Image: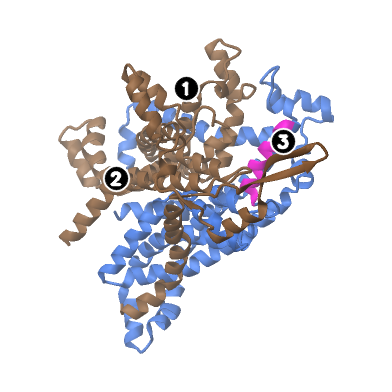
Amino acid sequence: MKHKAFFLFVLPSSVAMLLFIFFPIISVVVQSFYVSHEQVIVTVENCGPFGCKQATAIDQEATAALREAEPLGKFAGLATYRDRNHLAVDAVGSAWEKADNWRDFGAQMLNLPFYKALGFTLTFTFVVTPLVIIFGFVIAVAVNSAASAIRGPLIFFSLLPMMITPLIGSLILFWMVDARGIIGSALQYLAGNPDLSVKASTPLMWIMLMVYGVWHAAPFAFIVYYAGLQTVNKDTLEASRIDGANRWEQIRYVIIPHLLPLTTFIALMQLMDNFRVFEPIVSFAANAHATSLSWAIYNDLGGETRQLSSAAATSVLTIIGVAILLSPVLVRTWRDFGRK
Amino acid sequence: MSDITKKRPPAVQILIFGVLALWMILAAFPFLWTLWGSFKVEGDFFSKADWFYALSGTLTQNETGSSFTADGYEGAWIKEEFWRAALNSVLVCIFVVTISLTFGTLGGYALARSTYRYAFWFLIAALIFRAMPPITLVSGYLPVFFGWNLWGHLATCIIVLVAINQPFTLWMLHSFFKNIPQDLDESAMVDGCTRFQAFRHVIIPVMWPGVITTGLFSFLLAYNDFAVTAMILSKENQTMVPKIASFLGTTQTKGNVMFAVAAVVSATAPLFVMVMVFQRQIVSGLTAGAVKG
């Protein structure tokens, strides 16, 4: 294809991506180095019948003018990154000095908002991703062995947890695990503790969020593996059986190696998606127990005071996190491309 | 694999059946339970006394005189004006899908046909953009949207969702166009068509299966989005998902959590229908990227 034709064809999507993905990233990076202007304070003298008093007041006009003149705010360098809500350099330093052991240090770190969010996000990502792969594989093998007449309905119901809006799917589960809901009551009965409440317990909340994560994403792994199973070479399977491989050995030495490239694909997609975990925390109202990086940004942006700089700094740190997660894939692609 | 089925020992058969039964319960039961519960009053849906009330609707019977009630739906759709959010969702979805597909087919076609290095790097850049959590971009939009008075409008939301959709749409359509033989449009060009004419008259008639599949996923992204719609739409322009989230703040205190339950069921129904009708396309779309590597 000629350069000019190519350029014209990709123009609309390139413009859309440049304007609404690339420039915002740049703008977020720039914004994170600035903080908003403080209000301009003036001292005024109020003179009444009982003498004069000094009072401070906010000079609205001057504040507005200053904000108008420098809409980005005041340059602050890395100050936002270093403050207590982000990397908390000072707090980490003092925790490191004071803490007697790793456990203590870890506990103190988890009190800092950014590390609390990072801790949950990473735990969620690295617990949910392998579980999704395992469950997806098990379901795919089971569905593949079912009679072909019922496979259609099986696939239909399997797709539902993934197709559902994440916010809605997690709400549905949340209502069921409510202390008055069906799963919540069942848990109370099983634990023999009528006061057991998932909402009140941090470990249970973490577990619930991860259960939701697996429930939501397992169908994706299932569908991909199921499609992969349709392309397993029957002759190889037949040969392994003649050589005396039992059922498990057939799976272990024929099917799993065949599905390995798909596993890379699923793992990549799942790492990207789980790292942005966000909606279930809103639905479960879990923020007292678990926050994620995306939730931290949402929290900064919402509400009365929109803390743009703080949100921008967290966004940049999140993007760095995504880059680290993606780097093995990018390095591999680079090498593959170099070989071609 | 019918020959294997015959030889399967009963223990394995039972294991497979167990796995499937358990998974079906996990996958389908929450939806059925919520659908059933949405026709009850709060005292039954969240039953303090006895969980069986949720099935029998004892309190619903006492309060409304029948064991099913549509009060939740009435409250959500009429009193809380959920119809407005539904209308906004319809508008957003129609425009996002149409624009995404128009941009995406043009771009995806070019990426599939170009043999130059930059096409490859274009796709890699799109992959990196795909990995960005949308909420990180939102903090970049807000100052500009406030400054230029773009915040809160449906049109802004639509164009943002189109852009966020593009990387995925490009990847998917690119792999579909790769499967359409190159000879097809090249022979048209030998016959004197320009590149665009070849695209218009030769490729467009054969590309619909891929476009429909990609359209489904664009629709899902627009329909399911919460991060972007919650942050850049004003209260009157909210789509369904942020509207449901806002119910949680207001209705929990008023004791009308059933509005939210009814709204959740209403928002899920179109997805059900979509999965039922387009199951084949969804499965092929999910596996398109993977099986080819």
The residue at the far front in this view is A51
Chain letter, disc 1 residue:
A
Q: Name the residue beneath numbered marker 2.
A: A264
As drawn, is B279 to the left or to the right of B150? Answer: left
Q: Which of the pair A334/B103 is nearer the observer? A: A334
Chain containing the residue with disc 2: A
Question: Color of chain A here?
Answer: brown
Percent x, y of residue A2: 31, 80
Q: Quadrant of residue B12?
A: top left
Is B195 placed above or below B248 here? below
Q: Residues within 10 Å of mark 2 (few under 14, many from 20)?
A: some
Camera-near label (2 vs 1) is: 1
Foreground disc of the pair 2, 3: 3
* Quarter of the picture holding the N terminus of chain B: top left
Residue at x 40% of width, y 56% of height: B129
Marks 2 and 3 close (CB-CB < 8 Å) = no
Stretch of the chain drawn in magenta: B239-253
**Separation of marks 2 and 1 at Cα, in angstroms:** 30 Å
Spatial CA distance of label 2 from label 3 is: 44 Å
Neighbourhood count class around disc 1 (C-alpha, 10 Å): few under 14, some 14–19, many 20 upward: few
Residue A288 drawn at (x, y percent): 54, 28
- Where is mark 1, residue-wise? A203
Label 3: chain letter: B
Which residue is drawn at the image coordinates 40% and 27% (left, top)? A109
Kindly indicate the quadrant of the structure image that contains residue B116. Answer: bottom left
Residue at label 3? B251
Image location of residue B29, percent across then percent down = 56, 32
Q: Decide if residue A175 is on the left or right side of residue A207.
A: right
In which quadrant of the rendered image does the C terminus of chain B lie? bottom left
